[in-house]
Amino acid sequence: MKLLDSPAAPNPRRVRIFLAEKGIEVEREEIDIGAGVNRQSPYIDQNPMGGVPVLVLDDGTWLAESVAICRYFEELQPEPQLMGRTGQERAEVEMWNRRMESEILHTIAQTFRQSHKFFKGRIPQVPEYGEACRGVAIKRMAWLDEELGQKKFVAGEEFTIADITALCGIDFGRVSKIKIDPTHKNLTRWHEVVSARQSATA
Amino acid sequence: MKLLDSPAAPNPRRVRIFLAEKGIEVEREEIDIGAGVNRQSPYIDQNPMGGVPVLVLDDGTWLAESVAICRYFEELQPEPQLMGRTGQERAEVEMWNRRMESEILHTIAQTFRQSHKFFKGRIPQVPEYGEACRGVAIKRMAWLDEELGQKKFVAGEEFTIADITALCGIDFGRVSKIKIDPTHKNLTRWHEVVSARQSATA
């Protein structure tokens, strides 16, 4: 199998960190999203939305969507479990990962997509919406700081995919000048802990 | 356990259909989202984002996010399986469900959220973004029509959670005057098939 990857985007990083946590090595091919390779044939013939990453399986299937790729590897090699152990845990990790996607990663990524010149002409940009997302992202980081006052990681006492999503979202804020407020001590502590893991360099 | 529900919104309907497909009955409590009950204490003390539905478990846990609730029931009662059987199938269903969320349900719901008077004052509305989402939704429905020319259901030959998400998204288009184009024969055929299932009335 082969991972179609891109170094600077937040979603491919989610998958790279997930793989690093599991100690799985996969052949990678870099897709030049700057040149729009992912918006043209033959890429979009297999993945019409043009998203990166994609995992190309040995049977030729193109598996898109970061969490679908992570789920594939979680099923292939359960340990260390990053998506919960029991049924209830798996549901709770799903909840927390989705909260990190919609409230943190999505709002931060939309701030960039809707305002930055990189996406000009690539999507119908609405900069005013990007700025609304910036406001929501900042509020949600304050909420996450409160949540992290009660637990070690986003979904509880164990590191999970929800931490990976939050880390990739928050770190991607740099391109839109969204940063952790230093008065947010819990979020700062959590960010230091997850950034110090070997996987964060993946 | 108890499902905190709302009759008109698309996300609670996803969970109701999922439960109906499994033949599971759960006590329900209607949350008056028109009166903003979900945006006030005590609701937001347990589910800060104010989303509906929520499944309140017997141990008091509030499980939010529709797919997290569906996953809880898939684990509790696997049959009939709605999220895939093998590891690879589960990853592929995850991919298709996420595509239906981001390309169909999200774009259609955002058309409503960003433009409709219901959300005025509830969120920072950007009507121009709502209109951009309308354009994307219409394009994506054309794409889905093509996809459904090659298979019976969204993720393949079996009915899955991806069909539920697509159905709830497309049907919610009515409030924004987004409808299936009658020249889209595959999408029309699929919509008739999934709407004729008993679960669609849930």
Image: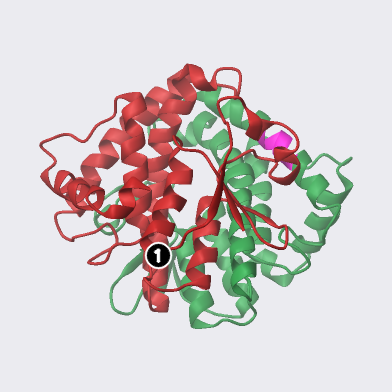
Chain colours: A red, B green
Tell me where residue A127 appears, x and y as whole percent. Answer: 46, 19
Nearer to us in this view, A39 or B26: A39
Q: Residue at x 50, y 31 (%)?
A: B114
Q: Is residue A75 left or right of residue B96?
A: left
Instruction: Work out whether A201 lies above or below A110.
Output: below
Instruction: Work out whether A14 lies above or below A112.
Output: below
Instruction: Work out whether B70 lies above or below A52.
Output: below
Three-letter code, disc 1: Lys
Magenta part of the chain: B136-141
The quadrant the N terminus of chain A occupies is: bottom right
Q: Residue at x 57, y 31 (%)?
A: A33
The verdict on residue B137 being magenta is yes
Q: Is residue B70 left or right of residue B44?
A: right
Identify the element where label 1 is drawn.
helix
The verdict on residue A60 being magenta is no
Nearer to us in this view, B51 or A80: A80
Tell me where residue A176 appears, x and y as whole percent. Answer: 35, 25
Q: Is residue A3 left or right of residue A20?
A: right
Q: How many marks?
A: 1
Nearer to us in this view, B80 or A157: A157
Could one spot residue B49 in this view of the protein?
A: no
> Main SS type for the magenta part?
helix
Tell me where residue B175 appears, x and y as whole percent. Answer: 63, 40
The residue under label 1 is A22
The image quarter in which residue B45 lies: bottom left
Q: Residue at x 67, y 37 (%)?
A: B137
The image quarter in which residue A72 lies: bottom right
Q: Residue at x 61, y 78 (%)?
A: B22
Crowd around label 1: few <14 · some 14–19 · many ≥20 (10 Å): some
Could one spot residue B25 in this view of the protein?
A: yes
Tell me where residue B103 appears, x and y as whole percent. Answer: 62, 43
The image quarter in which residue B190 lies: bottom right
